[in-house]
């Protein structure tokens, strides 16, 4: 093997089969279990999409009702998890809180070490049910606010927003949030999902795999980009400053957050759906200035680099308008992607092979250890 045979970053390397999702850059499409993601976002609740990712089919009414009952009954965080979150400094990043909380949730899970498909599904549902409370409580405590307990009479998205803001917002806002959850849920062998599969391949437990995935998602080249997009918007300030800002950033060889993708080269299939949701929010909150900044930077980036936005570009300002603090954006991605991660963890476990690639050694040739005094 020569260095030229090496696929740095595993770019273009197919490492396994999956039946969970299909990313097709040629047709600019993303399918979850065969269904176009934009159609799922338009017609399904996030709970239905979670069921689809885990089971391979959309639920019947009875199946959805059973899953909803189980999810709603498990939304309250164990006291030990609340205590650990409370003990963490508010100076740490919310992704650190998420990562730690999942680890502690695992320590409290009665089925933590049970690798059976039934136990894995139950653990996946518990994480799905409890992550909203983690994210919501962490944002609230940073604002000096008390924890808001979950409400079993609300759907996933409404309850998430209720626990974060203490009230259920207007239905347009709930819908926008739910669409973002559906779009973020799954994206084949991305860095965090692959991390989860690598950890699962060693026969480690499900919570360890999710903790590792959260670590991978935190970076700005992956999930951290939605937060970084808002930081960019804050730095630019207004549409009339966007072009000059971009010239300067590119001159300094900066990566522009929310643009580009390893797989899509002609635009991210999820962007049109999220952009239309952002347009609704811009109108709802009467923030045309944000819409103008979005469009101006997108156009300038297209003209200068011919690079298109990815999902994080519209998601960042959308979460800002919904009222989330910028550092909370990537934990929202975690709450959604935990569905895809756990589907992949179960798929990996069902036909496992230890993931253990090779490397080409380029260090010194064999040599003698010098005599030590
Ligand atoms: N800003 C400026 N230049 C860019 C960008 C960008 N966002 N993305 C790619 N390029 C340029 C890059 O500089 C390189 O140019 P050259 O060939 O002249 O050196 C060329 O395009 C190829 O870039 P690359 O980084 O080698 O491509 P990649 O496939 O390894 O990177 C990426 C994909 C997502 C890491 C990259 O586009 C990037 O860093 N984007 C910004 C971070 C971001 O938005 N991440 C979210 C990804 S999508 C959501 C998710 O999965 O979490």
Image (tube, helix red, strand yellow):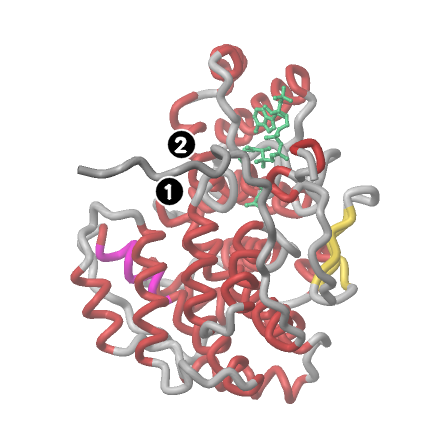
Which of these two is toward me, 100 or 159? Answer: 100
Which quadrant contains ligand 1? Answer: top right
Position of 287 relative to 66 (above/below)? above
Residue range highlighted in magenta: 133-141
Q: Which circle's residue, 1 or 2, is located before the other in the chain? A: 2
Residue marked by disc 1: 326
Residue marked by disc 2: 231
Q: Residue at x 71, y 47 (%)?
A: 13
Q: Quadrant of residue 144?
A: bottom left
In the image, taking residue 210 as reference, residue 33 lies left or right, namely right
Spot occupied by residue 187 in the image (x, y as percentages of width and height) = 64, 54
Which of these two is toward me, 327 or 108? Answer: 108
Residues at discs 1 and 2 in contact (Cβ within 8 Å): yes
Label 2 lies in ligand 1 vicinity (Cβ under 8 Å): no
Label 1 lies in ligand 1 vicinity (Cβ under 8 Å): no
Which of these two is toward me, 156 or 94? Answer: 94
Residue at the right extreme of this rendering = 27
Q: Residue at x 54, y 41 (%)?
A: 312
Residue 63 visible: yes
In the image, taking residue 106 as reference, residue 309 lies left or right, namely right
Position of the C terminus by quadrant: top left
Is residue 301 covered in magenta? no
């Amino acid at each position: 093997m020569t260095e030229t045979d090496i696929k740095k970053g595993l770019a273009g390397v197919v490492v396994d089969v999956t039946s969970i999702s299909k990313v097709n850059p040629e047709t600019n499409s993303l399918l979850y279990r065969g269904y176009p993601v934009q159609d799922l976002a338009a017609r399904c609740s996030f709970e239905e999409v979670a069921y689809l990712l885990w089971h391979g089919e959309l639920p019947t009414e009875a199946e959805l009702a059973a899953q909803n009952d189980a999810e709603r009954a498990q939304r309250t965080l164990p006291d030990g998890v609340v205590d650990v979150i409370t003990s963490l400094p508010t100076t740490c990043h919310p992704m650190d809180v998420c990562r730690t909380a999942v680890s502690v949730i695992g320590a409290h899970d009665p089925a933590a070490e049970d690798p059976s498909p039934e136990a894995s599904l139950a653990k996946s549902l518990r994480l799905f049910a409890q992550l909203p409370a983690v994210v919501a409580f962490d944002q609230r405590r940073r604002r000096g606010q008390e924890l808001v307990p979950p409400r079993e009479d609300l759907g996933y998205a409404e309850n998430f927003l209720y626990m974060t803001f203490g009230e259920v917002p207007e239905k347009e806002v709930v819908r926008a949030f739910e669409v973002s959850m559906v779009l973020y849920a799954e994206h084949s062998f991305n860095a965090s999902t692959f991390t989860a599969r690598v950890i699962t391949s060693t026969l480690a437990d499900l919570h360890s795999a999710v903790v590792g995935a959260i670590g991978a998602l935190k970076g700005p080249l992956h999930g951290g980009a939605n937060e970084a997009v808002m930081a960019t918007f804050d730095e630019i300030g207004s549409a009339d400053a966007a072009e000059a800002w971009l010239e300067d950033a590119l001159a300094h060889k900066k990566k522009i957050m929310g643009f580009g993708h390893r797989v899509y080269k002609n635009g991210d299939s999820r962007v049109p759906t999220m952009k239309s949701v952002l347009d609704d929010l811009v109108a709802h909150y009467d923030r045309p200035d944000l819409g103008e900044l979005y469009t101006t930077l997108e156009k300038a980036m297209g003209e200068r680099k011919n690079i298109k936005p990815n999902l994080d570009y519209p998601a960042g300002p959308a979460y800002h308008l919904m009222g989330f603090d910028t550092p909370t954006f990537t934990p929202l991605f975690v709450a959604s992607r935990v569905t895809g991660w756990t589907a992949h963890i179960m798929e990996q476990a069902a036909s496992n092979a230890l993931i253990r690639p090779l490397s080409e050694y380029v260090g010194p040739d064999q040599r003698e250890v010098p005599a030590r005094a």
